[in-house]
Amino acid sequence: MVTTGGPPTVETIAERAGVSIASVSRVLNGHGGRPDTVRKVERAAAEVGYVPNAVARSLKGGRSMQLTFAMQDIGNPVYVAMVRQIQTIAKQAGYRLLLHSTDAVVEDELAVLHSLADRTSDGLILCPIRITPEHIEALRTAARPVVVIGSLPGDVPVDSVRADSVTGAGLAVRHLVETGRRRIAFVNGPADTVPGRNRQRGYHQALAECGLPADPALVETTDFTVDAGSAAAHRLLDAVPGIDAVFCANDQLALGAAQALHSRELRIPGDVAVVGMDDTALVRAGWPPLSSVDLGSAERGRMAAQMLLERISEESAGSASRAPARVRTVTPRLVVRASSHPAEVTR
């Protein structure tokens, strides 16, 4: 048997299987062969521990059959819902899905975009919460197709799927007003992010439409986490009297706000109503179940995966001209649960 001291090669497999190097190459590259030859090669490859080199394969054939999904936090239920849909679509098309958690670090997101030139992935779904000039330049020059889950400037030639956070926030605020609340606090994530900026705009627009004043004391800006939501709710309750509702920019913040209210023995929704955003499984797990705005996380993931595969197909077919960038928007939906029942019913 050939021994090189290094990793197994096609020569190693050929000698072990008793077939030609050409036969091994055909089998390992998916081109088949006589059934007995295929069995011999596959058995020999398994025995010597052969692992195909994805980079070499992609350089030769132009396709890695891998897609990448890069998001802020792989543990966030929003991204879990997206992953399930993206992976389903990818598997159906014969692709593997690589996951990358960026922690919303711009440099990390840019590195993922630039890594498309290595050809280890045939396309990227990117879900950034900030869009910088560096993002836009990297998107314009990406070596492989990219779809962004999020909002992009109109002149960026990249497909995107976005949530309508402005409308979604308005649904939450108008619901709270309709149920008798008037001192509606808002716990937001970082205001320099796309979701933070849009959700704050929706909150203020809805207050104005309902004839309620915008009181800066009722707004807390923090991180998109449970602990941050709890701390922000405590600060609001200490500083502002008469709060009868808290609208939160995501479900993790809403859970934190609910924890703060429980710790002060305030009734939800009797004393203070709570509404979140994203409608993740988290809001159905506590008591009372929390109302939330469904921004279609799973649907955004499904649409992004389909759009990416369409672009990859166009690229593989060598289309002479690229179709204009497509923008898809998922319509939000308010899901009302016990945490925001009408005030007169709960008092």
Image: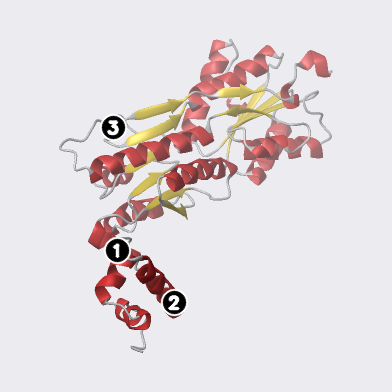
Residue 75 screen position, x and y as percent:
58, 50
Q: Is 304 or 226 nearer to us in this picture?
A: 304
Residue 297, disc: none
Q: Which residue does the numbered mark 2 point to in the structure image?
A: 49
Is 53 situated above or below 199? Answer: below
Residue 92 screen position, x and y as percent:
44, 44
Write the residue at 71% across / 35% down: 284
Q: Which residue does the numbered mark 3 point to in the structure image?
A: 325
Which of the 4 image quadrants contains residue 253? top right
Tell me the amino acid under the disc marked 2: Gly
Q: Secondary structure at mark 3?
A: loop
Tell me the amino acid under the disc marked 1: Arg
Number of numbered discs on residues: 3
Tell me the amino acid under the disc marked 3: Ala
Q: CA distance from mark 3 to mark 2?
A: 44 Å
Q: Nearer the viewer, mark 3 or mark 1?
A: 1
Q: Is residue 251 left or right of residue 311?
A: right
Q: Secondary structure at mark 2?
A: loop
Q: Is residue 149 visible?
A: no
Which of the 4 image quadrants contains residue 151? top left
Write the residue at 29% across / 42% down: 313
Q: Which residue does the numbered mark 1 point to in the structure image?
A: 57
Q: Earlier in the sequence, mark 1 or mark 2?
A: 2
Whether the residues at callouts 3 and 1 have beta carbons within 8 Å, the answer is no
Q: What is the crowding at mark 1: few (fewer than 14 residues within 10 Å), some, or many (at least 20)?
A: some
Residue 139 screen position, x and y as percent:
29, 44
Q: CA distance from mark 1 to mark 2?
A: 18 Å
Q: Nearer the viewer, mark 3 or mark 2?
A: 2
Q: Is residue 88 left or right of residue 26?
A: right
User: In which quadrant will I find the C terminus?
Assistant: top right
Q: Secondary structure at mark 1?
A: helix
